Amino acid sequence: MIQKWKNALTVYWDWRMLTMIGLGFSSGFPFLLVSGTLALWLTDSAVSLEMIGIFSLVKTPYSFKWLWSPLVDRFNLPFFSRLGRRRGWAVFSQILLLLTLLCMASVDPAQSVYLMMFFALLTVFASATQDIVLDAYRVESFDNRDQAAGTAMFILGYRIGSVFSGAVALILASVLTWNQVYVCMSLGAVLGMITILCSREPQKSKEQKLEFSGNFWQRLENFYKTAIKSPIADFVTRPSWVAVLFFVMLYKLCDAYMVPMTMPFYDAMGFTKTQIAFVTKFYGMAATIIGGILGGVIVNRFGIIKSLYLGSILQGLTTLMYVWQTHAGNDLYLLMGTVSLDNLAGGMSTTAFVAYISSLCNTAYTATQYALLSSFMSLARDLLASTSGALVKVTGWSMFFIITTLMAIPGVVILWLLQKKNKA
């Protein structure tokens, strides 16, 4: 038994794991800058809760990134192509991300809330493009056995990126203006550039070459067949593919729905920016790291399906801790426990979930299929989460978190039905 656990841990001793941490950071740091951290900036600027909830819609490019993922999957960018197909697109998207964050830093949301929404939308587009590339890079860098460990390290880097754009941003906001904070945050894209430039192009990709002979319409038809139709046709040949898509949409809904309201909730409970930064990021980071790594070990030891069940159940139970926090109010020690347990469960469930999505991808169409699957997950998160502010107004914080907890049930039910059907 002990030897099996040791074998599950040895997979982490690989130079590729360090690369995954850097790339995970680059993928993770933009998200809070267009969600939780931005929500607190909007709160400080006296923007209404309804409008903050509506800001969740700027994240819709995450849900529709599959629309341009075939371009990323098949075309080499001029000038950047010397770096390789994956690395070239990664550097391009990181440069674009740097510029759009600087645009956000130039806006006062109290005076130009819709302009801020527009620049946030452009930032999400750049971030989504980067995610297409980095997800494909990660999937192509590992075989199925090591995929969960690579995912765990990527998520670890993602969480560190979240600390940078969350805790560090909040600490800086106590001594700088929010505009200056976002200038500092934009430098996070530089770490991603350094990591990808120091890495190697993955060798696992089974790229299908495009034929550019014939007239314009023939070339367009060939692109459609090779880059769009073939990846989708390959996926729909899988058993129960419709149910798989619903599972992907609903599995993380419990966690995702409350994200836009967490920062306003902490503020409503009377916690200071420094306390929020310390508890939700620095104190909770240890739990997140343990959860992510433990999730990788559990997947390696017990398999993806059992890990998905465990992660979903724990995620739902830890969400109930916020109901207790609502009644306790400004209790810093309870907040430490709530955030720690939530991060632990979130790290475990996310590792198992991303490993599951990765296992569904054919490496001949990695970027397109992974973008399609992750987009379905984001679709539920962004469209439904846009109503979170209105729901808080109607129900109050306690009932809001109870309803959010119940959102964990559909994913578990669909997983059970998929497992039962596959056994049959």
Image (tube, rainbow, N blue to C red):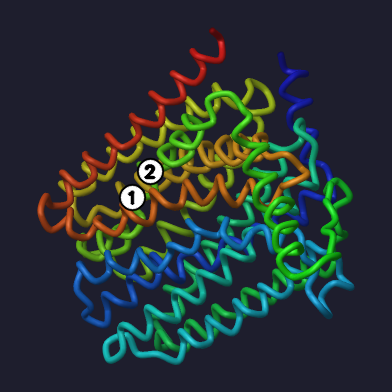
Give SS at disc 2: helix
Which percent across, then down, holds residue 174?
Answer: 38, 81
Q: Is residue 21 above or below residue 288?
A: below
- Say left or right for 46 vs 282: left
Residue topped by disc 2: 253
Q: Residue furthest top?
A: 424
| Residue 23 found in image quarter | bottom right
**Residue 14 placement, left or right of 153:** right
Q: Residue at x 33, y 29 (%)?
A: 409
In percent of width and height, residue 38 lies at: 38, 73
Kindly give the residue lying farthest to the left in the view shown. Answer: 394
Q: From the viewer's perspective, is residue 362 above or below residue 208?
A: above
SS assignment at label 1: helix
Amino acid under disc 2 = Leu
Residue 73, percent across and down?
73, 58
| CA neighbours of label 1 inside 10 A, class few (<14), some (14 to 19), many (20+) | many
Along the viewing direction, whichever of 171 and 135 lies nearer the viewer: 135
Q: Nearer the viewer, residue 74 or 337?
A: 74
- Is residue 23 in view? no
Q: Quadrant of the N terminus?
A: top right
Crowding at mark 2 (Cα within 10 Å: few <14, some 14-19, many 20+): many
On-image quarter of the C terminus: top right
Badge 1 is on which residue?
Answer: 257
Q: Nearer the viewer, residue 330 or 19?
A: 19
Distance from Cα at disc 2 to Cα at disc 1: 6 Å
